[in-house]
Image (tube, helix red, strand yellow):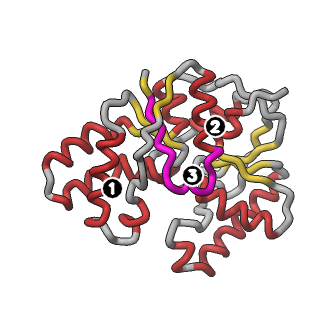
Amino acid sequence: MRIGLFVTCFNDTVFPESARAVVRVLERLGHQVVFPPAQTCCGQLHFNTGYQRECVPLVRKFVTDFAGLDHVVSPSASCVAMVREYHARVAEVSGDAGLARAVAETAPRVLEFTELLVDVLGMTDVGAAFPHRVTYHPTCHGLRVLDLGDRPTLLLRAVRGLRLLDLPGARECCGFGGTFALKNADTSVAMGADKARHVVETGAEVLAAVDNSCLMHVGGLLSRQRAGVRVMHVAEILAEEGA
């Protein structure tokens, strides 16, 4: 099985360890991971800000870069949601029937990391060990667009030594929302502060999620509060093998 790695520009620039963790887990399970080096942005930032036509070259490049792979995996629920749910809309805006066909072929094969592990590879125990108290935040794109359900928590519960703690108000948005955090900073910070407070209430050592953008937002607030809670992508926890 040839699995393509879609790193995403946010992870590549700020959180590359999450993408490395995806590779470590998949190679540990015996799978080949292919990295198309010319890949770039999926267009989510442009699309969410209303620049749908400006997304067309990015979508065209995406389907070219990831053609011919069995599956494409990414450590970003929000970018996977962009590809699966909205690349077809961009193709429609372009008026290019060929692009629409290419999107229809490529987009369904693009999976968030926990989807690939649970649904395609049939794995919940990936051989990880992480003896810490962890709480999990289901990010909005994972929860409401991809409908990840309990896939991330199934994987976390199978990690040796990990104690998974319920997060109060888990389904509430953390307030990041991409450019929302810039355009509505006061509201975004207030929502993030609520999430950070709930995280601290759990007594967790680590806050986990499947989107580093949300972890960056909540993690920044936790850091400023000196709460003693670190943030980790789910893939990074699954890559841990213990001593």
Residue situated in front as seen by the camera: 78 or 1: 1
Magenta stretch, residue numbers: 3-17
| Residue at far top of view | 30
Badge 1: how crowded within 10 Å, few (<14), some, or many (20+)?
many
Badge 2: how crowded within 10 Å, few (<14), some, or many (20+)?
many
Q: Mark 1 belongs to which amino acid?
A: Leu
Badge 3: how crowded within 10 Å, few (<14), some, or many (20+)?
some
Q: In this figure, which residue is indicated by the disc labeled 2? A: 21
Mark 1 / mark 3, whichever is N-terminal = 3
| Residue at far front of view | 37
* Above or below, 4 relative to 100: above
Give the SS element for disc 1. Answer: helix
Q: Position of residue 187 (x, y in %)?
A: 60, 78
Q: Where is residue 158 in the image (x, y as percent from the top left)?
A: 70, 28
* Above or below, 62 relative to 89: above
Q: Mark 3 belongs to which amino acid?
A: Asn
Residue situated in front as seen by the camera: 169 or 176: 176
Q: In this figure, which residue is indicated by the disc labeled 3? A: 11
Query: In this rendering, would 145 be left or right of 159?
Result: left
Q: In this figure, which residue is indicated by the disc labeled 1? A: 58
